[in-house]
Amino acid sequence: MNNTNNFFQQKRILLAVVLSFLFFIVYDYFFIPKNPPKLNQNITKVESNAQFDAPKHNIQPVEIQKNVLQDQIIADIKSDHFEAKIDALGRISSFYLKDKKYQNENGEFINLVSKNSFPYPLEMRFSDEAINADAFKTPYISNFKELFVDENGSKTIKLTQKLSSGLMIEKNITFYPFGNYKIEVSLNKNSHYFISPGSRPNIAVDSYTVHGALVMDDKETIHTFEDGKVDKEQNMQNIWMTSAFDRYYATFFYNFEKPLNITIGKDAHENPLVFASSDNKFEAGGYIGSKEHVILRSIDPRLEAVVEYGWFTFIAKPMFVFLNFLHNHIGNWGWSIVIMVLIIRVILFPLTYKSMISMNKLKDLAPKMKELRECYKGDPQKMNVHMMELYKKHGANPMSGCLPILLQIPIFFAIYRVLLNAIELKAAPWIFWIHDLSVMDPYFVLPILMGATMFVQQLVTPMTIQDPMQAKIMKFLPVIFTFFFVTFPAGLTLYWFINNLCSFIQQLIINKIFAKEHHKK
């Protein structure tokens, strides 16, 4: 027979378990890849020297014939931070990041433009089929073969293409040191066309994070198009910025003065394809590179919208701002996480204190509650009334332990998204063996410490659970959590370990305070 105490205890335990495990179960079942994603699993696969029809009613590329022009490099643009190559079709056919931070595991510079991912950045497709076919057969001419962009300067390259129909296309591209550029297109007569900032980079593609495309309109509303979920073409006007992105990298167009007309198409796998359109002149800022806040902010603060945290963006963004603020003063991301946890615990301490005191009171009232259950065994309604009176008289609240949990769950999710998506944490060390807070602890030290602190916290936390099944669940929680945290980023595990350690210390102190006051009474 259920009684009031068991009812509230069961609700509290179930709430804690459900909220805690909801993330992990969903994460494991839906997001952890059962087969690791292949390099180009999420893009349309075509031959590397294929030509495409123009988008007429939609923007799906169609392979038609071999085209050697895309294998011809007509210009090479370099800076200390990147190297870009432009092919004879007037497109950026490769874009290498040269900073050490962005090297792959083999120490090689990463290329953000995959050979098998179309469209390439600055690729144009005409609505007129005849013009489009001619455009993919006619090479561009460049006024420079090589350019070097100084650290504080910019360099402009001019590309021209003259078609047999008499149509002349001119592209002026001004490159800046960190991978941003300005593109200006003009035709000698009107002809409707689409131009792309490129397909999303395919470097940090996994099943844990959102990747695809996004659009920000002139009201600063963000529209996200995830890979595999685009079922129809969409035309959008008055657009400030549009981006194709993976976990850490992005390519995009933006224009905050003259909003763009954007079309989001789809490939054969329902992944988004991003295009802007015009009949003649086209002007936009562009970027290919990492989603690092400092770089994006230096171009325009509004471009930080490219960093996508999913559902918890509204919490994760200020959380990153706060974490970045701490890092600017501390200089180490790991210690910044530790200090952030301590500050959060101080802010939540009043609620935590009330919760822990209430749990001590419930433990103290256990004998009286047992008497009431025995006394009113045949009358549950009277038993519930007397239980509530007992709680009220002694200032105990069976549900008081839920509020701190409810507050910490969204913070946990936000920290998870920040550590997973913020490229600033890539290759960021903490101490000793932790050389990268964005990947798992290679020696499993932090997950084990996290589980151990969770276990000892249970030992000092007052429990009034009498149901054997609930008691077993609680005992196994540290083991199960340790198992789940083994593959999580070290930064996230560090956060949870410090959080558990704080809870353990707080509980010890409050237990002593409560015991002292109880002894006086």
Image (spheres, helix red, strand yellow):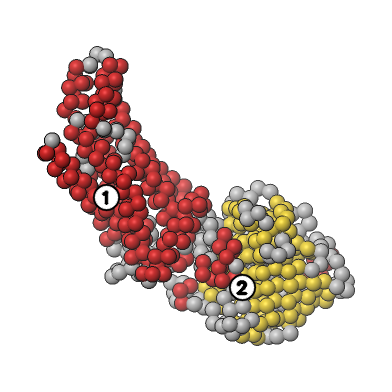
- Sequence-wise first label, 2 or 1: 2
> Mark 2 and mark 1: span between their CA atoms?
46 Å
Marking on residue 503: 1
Q: Please report the residue visible at 62 percent of the width from the left and 78 percent of the height from the top.
A: 176
Percent from the top left, x then y, of residue 145? 68, 85
Percent from the top left, x then y, of residue 219? 65, 54
Picture quadrant where residue 402 is located: top left
- Label 2: few (<14), some or many (≥20) within 10 Å? many
Picture quadrant where residue 91 is located: bottom right
Q: Please report the residue visible at 62 percent of the width from the left and 53 percent of the height from the top.
A: 221
**Quadrant that contains the C terminus:** top left
Q: What secondary structure is marked by label 2?
A: strand
Residue underneath mark 2: 180
Q: Residue furthest front?
A: 520
Instruction: Tell me if residue 187 comes above or below residue 489 in the rendering.
Output: below
Q: Can residue 483 be seen from the camera position used here? A: no
Q: Would residue 18 be found to the left or right of residue 179 on screen? A: left
Nearer to us of marks 2 and 1 is 1
Percent from the top left, x then y, of residue 155? 66, 82
Q: Would residue 365 be found to the left or right of residue 331 on screen? A: left
